[in-house]
Image (cartoon, helix red, strand yellow):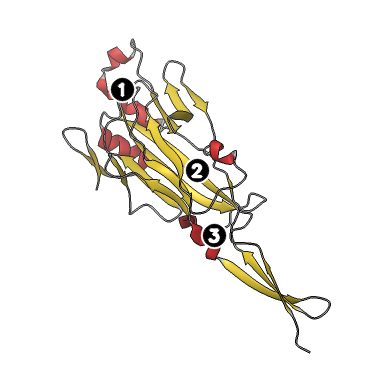
Amino acid sequence: MKKKRKLLSAGPVILLSASALLLIGSTVGSTKAALTYYSDNYTADMSVSSIGVSLTENGKTISSRDYSHSNNEWDVTKGELFKDLQKNDSIVPGKAYGEELGVANSGSIDSYVRVILTKSWTDTKGNKDTELSPDFIDLHFVEGNGWIIDETASTPERTILYYTGIVPAGESTPNFTDTLKIDNKIAEKVKVETDKDEEGNEIIRHIYKYDGYQFHVDAEVNAVQTHNAQDAIKSAWGVDVNVSADGTLSLQ
């Protein structure tokens, strides 16, 4: 007797929930270099400027960290990325969602800024799964607007970006991303399992590797004052840079 074959499929559409945490920081040590502007006599009597930086999403401040010398304290606000996306029950693979991320100088001195983005996948318990590819979390970077990627220090999981211009106090950079998309190639990551029911009929199951997982994007923003920028950046970030006469930053 020829056995029947039953085909069970989870379907071609994978439902993904979006989750992104934000880590944002300014380099405390770098603010000390601002004191080299003044003699010891002046610094004893004057209010030294403060350094601060904020991450913006679609024109709104998501998180910020500002340091004030007047009370030697950090003023920190923490937010969550992609909250509007999380209002949806699912993220459609292959669809580009508007995600304009940028940096604002929320301090009172001019600064150079950089951003470190980290992408990962987690299971239902929040555990990171390193076998899943961060390449499928596609943040589209805007080119030609002053942002550059440090290719030598970046990996599929981590991207480091530098803004090459000075960000004046109270002003913002151009956006470094404009869309977020989950690559629809995740639908191709399928494992086929076969089994038999009580009657001996063969059952074929298609198990989608990314089904039920969450994607995470962590954003860390750093700021360094412009005075003695090369030394300050080397000290704070451990990176060698060139700074031209007009203030343009480039990586060595």
Q: Residue furthest top?
A: 45
Query: Which secondary structure, mark 1?
Result: helix
Residue receiving disc 2: 218
Circle 1: is it few (<14), some (14-19), or many (20+) Cα within 10 Å? some
Horizontal and vertical percent for residue 180? 46, 46
Horizontal and vertical percent for residue 44? 34, 13
Residue receiving disc 3: 132
Q: Are marks 1 and 2 in contact (CB under 8 Å)?
A: no
Residue 225 lies in what quarter of the image?
top left
Residue 85 lies, with reference to residue 52, above or below; the image says below
Say what amino acid the circle numbered 1 marks. Answer: Leu
Disc 1 to disc 3, C-alpha distance: 47 Å
Residue 236 lies, with reference to residue 138, above or below; the image says above
Residue at 56% x, 53% y is 121
Residue receiving disc 1: 35
Q: Are marks 1 and 3 in contact (CB under 8 Å)?
A: no
Name the front one of labels 1 and 2: 2
Disc 2 to disc 3, C-alpha distance: 16 Å
Circle 2: is it few (<14), some (14-19), or many (20+) Cα within 10 Å? some
Query: Which secondary structure, mark 3?
Result: loop
